[in-house]
Image (tube, rainbow, N blue to C red):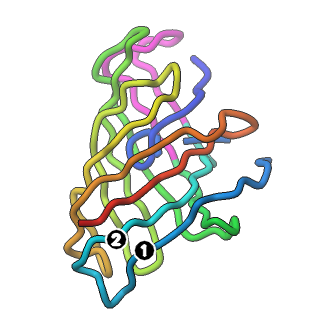
Amino acid sequence: MRPIRAACLGTATLVTLLACTPVAAAATDTGSAQARDKARTITVLAEAQQLTRFPVVPGSVSQGDQVVVRSDLFDEAHNKVGETHGTCTTTRGGADEAEQCVVTYVLPGGQLTVQGMYFDYLDQGPFDNAITGGTGEYGKARGWVHSDTISLTPKVVRRFTIHLV
């Protein structure tokens, strides 16, 4: 089985992953519960806690491979504020691998669902995924999530900037 360096989670392999050094997060929420239907931005750090790849062809990255990932979400004071749970399916194998991911963000006040493509698996580049729905405080959620890789060791840490519109 090929070692996994990252996944988006969020969405994608929040796609995201494995004694972590405390990391300062830029966790902010520029809105409030009273402004649910107005634009706001939430920023959290994600540290992957579990990631498993189920290869179609052991030892290679092939179309149809599955990745299952779970990450913890932290605010800027490194307090746990939620989790992500997601799956990704490899749609293009090889060095220029592409994955289609579906991720649920469990946050205070409800959940957000996110979906999209993840292209930069080898170099862990940034990606954007669409918010496709939500529950509770996020019941009418629309927008996107931007992901940047902050660290690859000892765990993969990503910054998720959630743009609610």
Q: Which residue is mark 1?
A: 30
Whole-angstrom CA distance, mark 2 to mark 1, is 5 Å
Q: Please identify the quarter of the rendering in which residue 113 is found.
A: bottom left
Q: Residue at x 46, y 71 (%)?
A: 107
Residue at image mark 2: 40
Residue 61 magenta:
yes
Is residue 21 a member of the stretch shown in magenta? Answer: no
Q: Amino acid at mark 2?
A: Arg
The spot of residue 66 in percent (x, y) is 40, 30
- Specify the principal SS of the magenta part: loop
Helix, strand or loop at label 2? It is strand
Quarter containing the N terminus: top right
What span is colored magenta in the figure?
52-69
Among the 4 quarters of the image, the one containing residue 81? bottom right
* Circles 2 and 1 in contact, beta carbons < 8 Å: yes
Dot 2 or dot 1, earlier in sequence: 1
In the depicted structure, whether residue 71 falls above or below residue 13: below
| Amino acid type of the residue tagged 1 in the rendering | Thr
**Quadrant, the C terminus:** bottom left
Q: Residue at x 45, y 40 (%)?
A: 8
